[in-house]
Image (cartoon, helix red, strand yellow):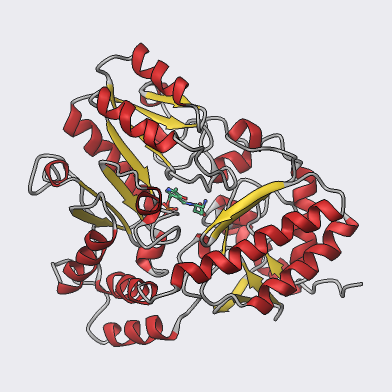
């Protein structure tokens, strides 16, 4: 038996928020629309935990959607920011910190020879698409159903994340002319990609994908899928782009491309490299990146790009991730969590599938297997909503959508995982 969650203050604040901000939030998935009930208003975070404005504590498996991989408010990051603050919050001019973070990204990510910092993953994906088109002189792109690359018009076609959550097939306000150059294929379907290349010879600038999907729930690539895309893009004079905004520095220090050994032409990054401050980045082959203004003709700019605070938080976060044992630890605790959830689902009679790679995991209430977005949509969304609410009421904060992945951090302990699994058993027994 649990004490009902006291959410008085959360409800008051959310009610007021809805009058002054669309849906009461600044990003749709936070509104809990797909899981029902009121969102929790956060007051503060630390390590693996979050506290809401009513004083309830949660073990947090969203981690600000990925950036909090070292644990929220890591003292080294906070102290580095405090020192940086004394020197100002933004320069609008080059600073050494940009060189330092750029060098770290180039050293870490196999495909990246040059990098440009921007302020969000969306901005990184918008920019990389323009670059793909500028370099190849071609207009069309291939994306995959359920993959989310930020809210740029041309990507809002069968996208994942909040679009999937809200069931927005194509957002209003996106001209047909814009999406007419966006081709889509089911994830893990090389034949479909081959067919699109055959139907659009010489017209496809490139293929962009989440090399491990996090925005349709957690969907890893089938064996040979990434390798097959590498071959197909090369054969067709198209570019291969890994959107590693979510997976970068999470799956491995060098991202999916390091772990799976498939090197794209261009990569987008975000989340972790900002250490919780707004940073995105795109980078890749020097011959391609040299097209970016002012080195080349492809224009892209940003007032706060490379600002000293965001660079500082990113540098310190990557330094922490370089410590030996980081990714082994993330994999160990996340494997324990994921395997435990699947075992408990089995023991309590719920069809479920899912898995994890390093500090990223997912759970679908369907027998599966889940190889693509269509499979993911077969999961029992109503059951997921009841599960989410049950876990929340018992102090476990999961992503408020079936079409999101879960994230652990270096701050999550064995005891946190044990507690989470004990609660999951209680909730699944009553689902
Ligand atoms: P942002 O513009 O939200 O920084 O990044 C867009 C983006 C691009 N590519 C991938 C693979 C992403 O996962 C994202 C953003 N992820 C979502 C979570 N699924 C952000 C959370 C939100 O939209 O509130």
Q: Is residue 60 left or right of residue 427?
A: left
Does residue 168 lie above or below 100 as drawn?
Answer: above
Rendered position, 49 above or below 120: below
Whether residue 330 is situated above or below residue 216 in the rendered picture: below
How many marks the image carries: the answer is 0
Q: Is residue 257 left or right of residue 419?
A: left
In terms of depth relative to the viewer, which is nearer, 68 or 53? 68
Image coordinates for residue 268, horizontal then vertical, percent: 33, 49
Residue at 57%, 42% in the rendered image: 216
Of all residues shown, which one is farthest toward the left? 295
| Residue occupying the point 63% across, 55% down | 31
Residue 262, percent from left and from top: 34, 43
The one of 262 and 238 positioned closer to us in this rendering:
262
Residue 399 in which image quadrant = bottom right
Front residue (pair 152, 287) = 287
Quadrant location of the C terminus?
bottom right
Q: Quadrant of residue 376?
A: top right
Quadrant location of the N terminus in the rendered image: bottom right
Residue 53 visible to the viewer: no
Expressed as whole percent of the image width and height from the top left, the position of residue 414 reads: 65, 76
Image position, residue 393 (x, y; %): 78, 68
Q: Residue at x 72, y 69 (%)?
A: 420
- Residue 75 in view of the camera: yes
Horizontally, is 388 left or right of 300 in the view?
Answer: right
């Amino acid at each position: 038996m649990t004490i009902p969650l006291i959410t008085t203050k959360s409800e008051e604040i959310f009610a007021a928020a809805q009058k002054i901000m669309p849906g009461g939030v600044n990003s749709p998935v936070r509104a809990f629309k797909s899981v029902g009930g009121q969102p929790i208003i956060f007051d503060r975070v630390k390590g693996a935990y979050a506290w809401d404005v009513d004083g309830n504590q949660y073990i947090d498996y969203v981690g600000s959607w990925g950036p909090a991989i070292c644990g929220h408010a890591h003292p080294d990051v906070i102290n580095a920011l405090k020192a940086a603050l004394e020197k100002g919050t933004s320069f609008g001019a080059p600073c050494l910190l940009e060189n330092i973070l750029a060098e770290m990204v180039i050293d870490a990510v196999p495909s990246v020879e040059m990098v440009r910092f921007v302020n969000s993953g969306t901005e990184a994906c918008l920019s990389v698409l323009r670059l793909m088109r500028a370099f190849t002189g071609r207009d069309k792109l291939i994306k995959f159903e359920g993959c989310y690359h930020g809210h740029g018009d041309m990507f809002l076609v069968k996208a994942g994340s909040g679009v999937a959550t809200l069931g927005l097939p194509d957002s209003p306000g996106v001209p047909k002319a814009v999406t007419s150059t966006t081709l889509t294929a089911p994830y893990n379907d090389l034949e479909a990609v081959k067919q699109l290349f055959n139907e659009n010879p010489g017209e496809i600038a490139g293929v962009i994908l989440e090399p491990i999907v996090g925005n349709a729930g957690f969907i890893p690539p089938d064996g040979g899928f990434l390798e097959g895309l590498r071959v197909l893009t090369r054969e067709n004079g198209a570019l291969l782009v890994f959107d590693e905004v979510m997976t970068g520095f999470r799956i491995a220090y060098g991202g999916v491309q390091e772990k799976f050994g498939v090197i794209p032409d261009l990569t987008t990054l975000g989340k972790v490299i900002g250490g919780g401050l707004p940073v995105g980045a795109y980078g890749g082959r020097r011959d391609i990146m040299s097209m970016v203004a002012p080195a080349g003709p492809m224009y892209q700019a940003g007032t706060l790009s490379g600002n000293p605070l965001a660079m500082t938080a990113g540098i310190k976060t990557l330094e922490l991730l370089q410590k030996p044992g980081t990714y082994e630890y993330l994999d160990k605790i996340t494997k324990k969590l994921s395997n435990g959830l699947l075992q408990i689902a089995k023991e309590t009679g719920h069809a479920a599938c899912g898995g994890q790679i390093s500090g990223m995991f997912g759970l679908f209430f369907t027998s599966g297997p889940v190889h693509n977005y269509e499979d993911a949509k077969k999961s029992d969304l109503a059951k997921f909503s009841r599960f989410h609410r049950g876990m929340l009421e018992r102090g476990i904060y999961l992503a408020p959508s079936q079409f999101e992945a879960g994230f652990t951090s270096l701050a999550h302990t064995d005891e946190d995982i044990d507690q989470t699994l004990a609660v999951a058993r209680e909730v699944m027994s009553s689902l």
